[in-house]
Image (cartoon, grey):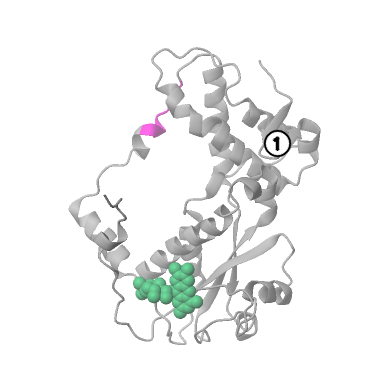
Amino acid sequence: MAEIEAIPSPGKKYRKESLMDLDPVLLRALLRERVHHNIEVPLYPVLLRQQLKPIPNFGLQAQLVFNVWRERGLSEEGTDLEWVKRYIDIAARVRKGERPDIPELEASLPKPFTASEMDVVRKLIWGRCSIRDWTDEPVPDSLIDQIMEAGRAAPVGCNLDAVRFIVLRTSGEKSMIWSDISIDNAVIIVICFDNRISATVGQDRMVPQNLGYDAAAAADHMLLMAHALGLGGVWLSKTVKSDHTEDTGRKFKELYGLPDHIDVALHIAVGWPASGIIKSKRVPLSEMIITKKT
Ligand SMILES: Cc1cc2nc3c(=O)[nH]c(=O)nc-3n(C[C@H](O)[C@H](O)[C@H](O)COP(=O)(O)O)c2cc1C
């Protein structure tokens, strides 16, 4: 089998020895990222080639990281590791010139929703609104878990999974959060990210904005799920220090005792709605589409 000795990530070069010492959280992120960029992204154009010739180097960077993962005896259980192993196997076949059978492709093909499914989608997308007033009825943990699960399903840059959540319920915990509204009756979910992960794969140099985007995508999924569960939610900005506010993220980080590598991106507040609102309306689509003036 062809072998490689090092993985060139943007601004980094990992040799096997350095991977043997890498924190498992970061190694897992690198593994997910390499499988994504070194196998998943180039795979489908490769498969479309009529005659698949052996591609000796295909997926070898991902394979190297996986070999280290295995050699270190790290757990191969978990849905993301199953996904990793699936692609590692497919890449090994492509290296030999085989055209691997991938039955999952059929099930993942987008198909138009039925009319009644579309009604639900529109109801969710256009019915969601920002609720800023909540009753004191407690929100069960099971619903908060469903909201975080929805955040977990959101798109993530480079397939890194660096988003992290903190759930705040008590008034003491919530007092660490700056907000322009009263959040006494709300559960706050702080959406953070692990900044070591982006540095590990060089994302911090190539696409530093992605970590904030990942958190934002998670927040949107979470607010949609909160709405579907009958809860009212709102996005709360993380302010940076100005004359009339304090740096919410930094204050929270200090008071909550977060490690340096966890950065706060934003918060959402969810709870049982005390009242509805006059739903805000958007500008017409025609004003949102920019066309080149001739
Ligand atoms: C990036 C972002 C930051 C926001 N920050 C706040 C905030 O700090 N406080 C707040 O009450 N609402 C905040 N919101 C909610 C917006 O005010 C709200 O989405 C907007 O007015 C449209 O109303 P709708 O959500 O009901 O459609 C924020 C929304 C976004 C996307």
Counting from the top left corner in percent of width and height, residue 29 is at 64, 45
Q: Main secondary structure of the magenta part?
A: loop
Q: Residue at x 49, y 34 (%)?
A: 41
Residue 104 shown in magenta: yes
Q: Residue at x 61, y 73 (%)?
A: 240
Q: Residue 275's quadrant in the figure?
A: bottom left
Residue stretch rendered in magenta on the structure: 100-105
| Nearer the observer, 122 or 24 | 122
Q: Residue at x 75, y 32 (%)?
A: 71
Q: Above or below — where is 201 with respect to 148?
A: above
Q: Above or below — where is 200 with respect to 234?
A: above
Number of residue marks:
1
Quarter, ligand 1: bottom left
Q: Is residue 45 left or right of residue 260?
A: left
Q: Give the SS element for disc 1.
A: helix
Residue 147 shown in magenta: no
Q: Which residue is outermost to the front?
A: 294
Q: Is residue 270 visible?
A: no
| Nearer the observer, 192 or 111 | 192
Give the amino acid at mark 1. Answer: Trp
State which quarter of the image contains the N terminus: top right
Counting from the top left corner in percent of width and height, residue 7 is at 69, 31
Q: Residue 272's quadrant in the figure?
A: bottom left
Q: Is residue 195 visible?
A: yes
Q: Which residue is mark 1?
A: 69
Q: Is residue 289 left or right of residue 201?
A: left
Counting from the top left corner in percent of width and height, residue 111 is at 27, 42
